[in-house]
Amino acid sequence: MKFLSQFSLAKRGKINKYLRLVDNNKYYSNFGPLYLKLKKKIERNLNYKDNNIIFTSSGHSSLLAVTKYLSTKLKKKYVLCPSFSFYSNPLSIIDSGFKPYFVDINTDNLVIDLKLVKKILSKKNDIAFLMVVSPFGYPVDIEYLNKFQKEIDIPIVYDAADAYLNLKKKINNKIFITCSFHPTKSFGSNESGLIISPKKHIKNLENLINFGLKNKNSTSNTIGFNGKFSEYDAAILLANFDEIKSKKKDLKKKLEIFLKYFPKKYKIFNNKKIITNKVNFYFNPKKIYQLRKIFLKYGIIINKWWSENSMHEINIFKKYPKTRMNWTNSTKKNIYGFYLDHKINTKKIKDLCNELSKL
């Protein structure tokens, strides 16, 4: 699938250096030398001293591993999660034997409404854990999430998804973080993912993505799946990681230009402190045809992120409980976005914004 105007990934020449190492090592499958090299680099970059990381085959594999692991520990029925999210969120919950309980979002940050979460928890005692989803690479306040977890005293799974470039602060021992390195993400690579977990859970999570096996000669005591990350995955991600500083600098510069010139009549969701390859704004859907036409002149496609509908509106999820969805419904209807084109220059951005101001 081709994506216009997205984050530029490492070219073949940069990846080849790591592919040669794969051949030299004669190690092609999982948990090999390149995996360990990448693991050290990412752990140094994140600097989470009380947590370890695992790479997986996709962002969904990361979510599924964590939810399946929690299903072996928690016998309660529901998982509180936002409907303003992607299929991966409720599907990982259902595949792990839980039921999603959809909760409305907070209009200020488009994250699950934590006041509503507390209200539900005060009335129901069958909630296993809370799933928080980062919208479009926009990070959740980890420091606040740490405090909130202590208040509610149930585990939190934070699907940071596209927010790897914005992860900060220490996480406590009841929060699991998952990320995606899908090519459309701000720090894109191949289809792979990441779990950040308290150290005591790491071995169990590694077993889960390896069919539940502790090692190749053991039998499985857990129902796992194949979510492993190969040496080829590591080679591609290492090549992209080598360019992470220049990519962040380029994204930051282009986003600042868009924020400066983007018409004020469209409420823009981004701010200059967040590094992302996506610009998000509110727009009247009645004029969307004209809007798309203007952007296409500059080779940019306007997107409805995740899906056209929120998860509680999807047929397979309609039977699950939900709160009122006032903000979810209005936000999903009116928010649009586009990828920051790594080739677009300042003049084109100004010209584009000038046309938008006349719409």
Image (cartoon, rainbow, N blue to C red):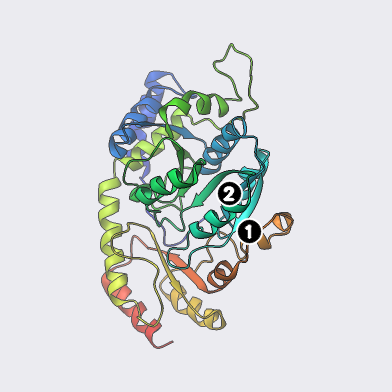
Q: Badge 2 is on which residue?
A: 89
* Residue plotted at (29% across, 36% down): 47
Query: Residue tagged by mark 1?
Result: 311
Alpha carbon distance from label 1 to label 2: 9 Å
Q: Give the residue type that dot 1 points to.
A: Met
At label 2, which amino acid type do we have? Answer: Asn
**Which of the two labelled residues, at mark 1 and mark 2, occupies the earlier sequence position?**
2
- Where residue 325 sits, quadrant-wise, is bottom right
Quadrant where the C terminus is found in the figure: bottom left
Locate residue 42: give its quadrant: top left
Can you name the residue that lies furthest to the top here?
A: 217
Residue 58 location, x and y as percent? Answer: 52, 40
**Residue at left offset 65%, top offset 35%:** 75
Question: Mark 2 and mark 1 in contact (Cβ < 8 Å)?
Answer: yes
In this view of the protein, can residue 257 be seen by the observer?
Answer: yes
Compared with 26, 298 (above or below) is: below
Rendered residue at 49%/34% (across/down): 56
Check the image and report above or below for 146 versus 103: above
